[in-house]
Image (cartoon, coloured by chain):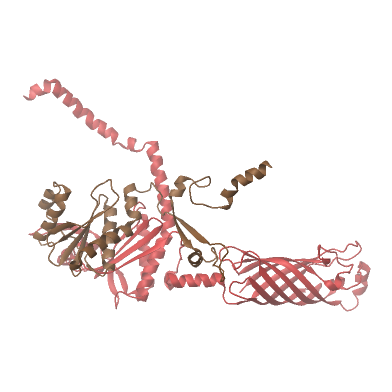
Amino acid sequence: MKMWLADSPARRTSCRLQFWLPLLFALWASPVRAASPVQLAQEAELNRLRGEVANQVQLSAYDLVDELVVGWKTDPVFDEATPVVLAGVTVPVGLGTGMAALLENHIAAVLAENPSTHVQLVHCPTCTAVVVHSDAEATVVSRGIDDPAVLAQLGTDTGKHALFIDIEAEGTWLVLRARLTRLTPDLPIVWSRTIASSTSTPALLRASSDLKSAADAREDYLAALHDRGPLTIPVRLGVRAYAAPTDSSGVTVPPFIWLQTGVEMGATDARAWTSSVLVGISFIPQAYQGLMAQARVSRLVTGRTRSLSRPDLYLFLGGAIMTVWGPATAPFQADLLTADDLITSLDGDPPRTTLGTLQIGLDLRLGNRIGLSTFFETIPDRNQSENFGTYTRILGLGFQSFGTEVTFCF
Amino acid sequence: MIIVILGLLFLPTLIHKDPAPGMTMSRTRSRTLECERITAEVASQRYPGKVQPSRPRGEYLERSALVCAERLVRPGLREDRDEAILSSLQALVADLTSSAVDLHPELASRTWLVEAFYPSAPVSAKLSFATKNALVERGLLVSDRTPTLSAGDVDVLTRMPPEQAYPAACRRYNDNGSMGAEHALLAIVSRDPRETILHAGLCADGQWSWLK
C-alpha cells in the first residue's frame, strides 16, 4: 500500500506539493517579502504619523493626569495615606507603549509631589505579572491583580487598591478614564472618574509641585494676559534725535537719551484708552543733563479691547516739559547758534533751557509687558528757530524731533 | 484690469476661511476636522481675545462662531471599524448602559460585572473600562471581577452560533457559581464585523436577554 502510494501519480503530486508548499509559504512569510520597499515606506510613514500624534497628545494627556490629581487633592478618595498599585496605564489605540511609559512616570512624579492626595504608589511586580494558580477546582491563568484571592494564597503583600488609567482619543477629544479598585476577592470599584479635554484647548503645563485646578489655572492665565490691575509701572528708555538745521553753518543738536518711569492707567479693563504720567532723567557726562515730566493719552487702534493673543497698537498724543543744561544743550537757545558761539560760551556757565513739547506717535505693546514706540515731537516755542530743521509738518506745525522708545511694564 | 478681475475671482477664498472642501481646503483635510457652531457669547468666553464679546447694546449683525478642531488621530492610523467605535466611545457606552439600567431598574441594587466581546483586545479593554466607569457614574455597584468558565465550557461555547452561545454562557456562569443572585452581567458585544454599532446583552440569574 505504501509502495503503491509512493509510486502513484497522486503520491508524486502530493510529494511535490509537500515540498513546494512549505517553500512557498516560507518565501511568502520570509523577511525578504516583509521588507519590500513599499511596505517599509508605509510602515515608516505610519511610525512617523504615530510619533507626530503622540507628541501632540502627550502634553494634553499630562494635563488630564494633573487634573485628576488636583481632584484628589481637593476631594481625597482616602482619609489617610493608602497604598495603591498602578495596575495599568493604557494609551490611545495606535500610539504604542512608549507613551504609556511616559505617562506612568508623570503619574508617579505628580503623586510623589502631592502627598495630600493620600494616594501612595507602591511597587508590586506580582500584581501585574501573570500568575498561574492550580487547585482542585481549576487552573487559573491571570494577572495577579485580576485574582487577588490567588495573590493572598501566594502570600504576596499587595497594595490595598489598584489604580487603572486609560486615555483614549475620541474624535477631537482626549478622554481620561480612571478607576480605583479595592484588592479583595470581589474587586469592587470604589471610585471612578472621566475627564475630557478638547484638542483646541492648549495644555496648561502646570508645575507638579504647585498644582492648580484647570479653572484656577485659566483665571491666572487670563489675569496675566488681561492685566495685573488698572495701574502699571512703565520703565522706558528712549532716544530723541533732532533734525539738522537748514543752515549748514549751524550746530546740530546731539541725540538725547532719556530714562523715564511713572504710572500708566487704563480707563477700563479693555484698556482701549490709557493715560500715563512719567518723569525722566538724561545724563551724559561733559555733554548734557536733563529732567523731564511727560504725560500721554493713548488710544487702541487695533480693536476695541486689548488682545490676549496678538500685539496691540496704540496711537498716542502727549506733552512734555523738559529742562536741559550742559555744553551740548546750547542749540536749544532761541538764537541761531554757530561754532564760534560755542567756542566763546565754553568759558562761562553752561547754558540751561526749559522747553515744552507736544508729541504724536504709535506704541506697539506686546502682552502689556513690552512696548516699542516711535513718535514725532514738536517744540512750539522753537518753531521758528534756525537751530533746528524739521522732520515733517502736520497742520503747519513743524516736528523737529523724532524719537524711539522701549518700554518695560511692571 | 486683469489683475482686478483675478483679484475679485479669488477674493472670497482669501477673506473667508471655510472648513468645507474647496480651493483652499482638500477633502482629506476637511475630513480631519470636527466643527461646531456656537454663539458669539459662548465663543468669547471659550476663546477670550480671539472672539470679541457682543456690544452691550446689541449688534447690527447676528454673529456666531464656527469652531473647528482637528481629530487627534488622523484617518488611516487605526482600523476603520476601531476608529468608528473609539471616536464615539463615550456616547456609545452611555447609550448602552442607560438602556441596561433604565430597562431593568430591579437590578439597581446588584453588583454589576462587565464584559466586552470585540475582535481587537485593546479596543475590547477600552470598551470594558468605559462601560464600568459609566455604570459607576450612574451610582451602581460595579466590580472588576470577570466571571469565569471552565475550559470544557469554552470549548463547547465556541462551537455554537452566537445567538445560542451567549445564553448558554450565561447559564453556565450561574451554574458554576461564577455569578450569583447578587450579580448582573452587562456584556458589550460586536455581533457583525461589518457594523460599527455595538450591542448590549444582560445576564442575570442565568437568564440572557438582548438589550440593544
Q: Is residue A86 visible?
A: no
Residue sitting nearer the eye, A375 or A99: A375
Q: Answer above or below: position of B88 versus A329.
A: above
Q: Residue at x 53, y 47 (%)?
A: B24
Residue A231 is situated, as x and y percent measured from the top left of the image, at 61, 77
Q: How many marks?
A: 0
Residue sitting nearer the eye, A144 or A240: A240
- Horizontal side of residue A346 vs B32, given as left or right: right
Q: Residue at x 89, y 74 (%)?
A: A346
Q: Quadrant of residue A208?
A: bottom left
Residue A215 is situated, as x and y percent measured from the top left of the image, at 44, 71
Chain A tint in image? red
Q: Which chain is brown?
A: B
Which quadrant is home to the C terminus of chain A?
bottom right
Residue sitting nearer the eye, A164 or B211: B211
Q: Residue at x 70, y 77 (%)?
A: A278
Residue A30 is situated, as x and y percent measured from the top left of the image, at 30, 36
Furthest-front residue in view?
B60
- Horizontal side of residue A372 vs A206, given as left or right: right
- Horizontal side of residue A137 vs A64, given as left or right: left
Q: Is residue A395 visible?
A: yes
Residue A160 is situated, as x and y percent measured from the top left of the image, at 24, 71
Q: Quadrant of residue B143?
A: bottom left
Q: Answer above or below: position of B192 versus A174.
A: above
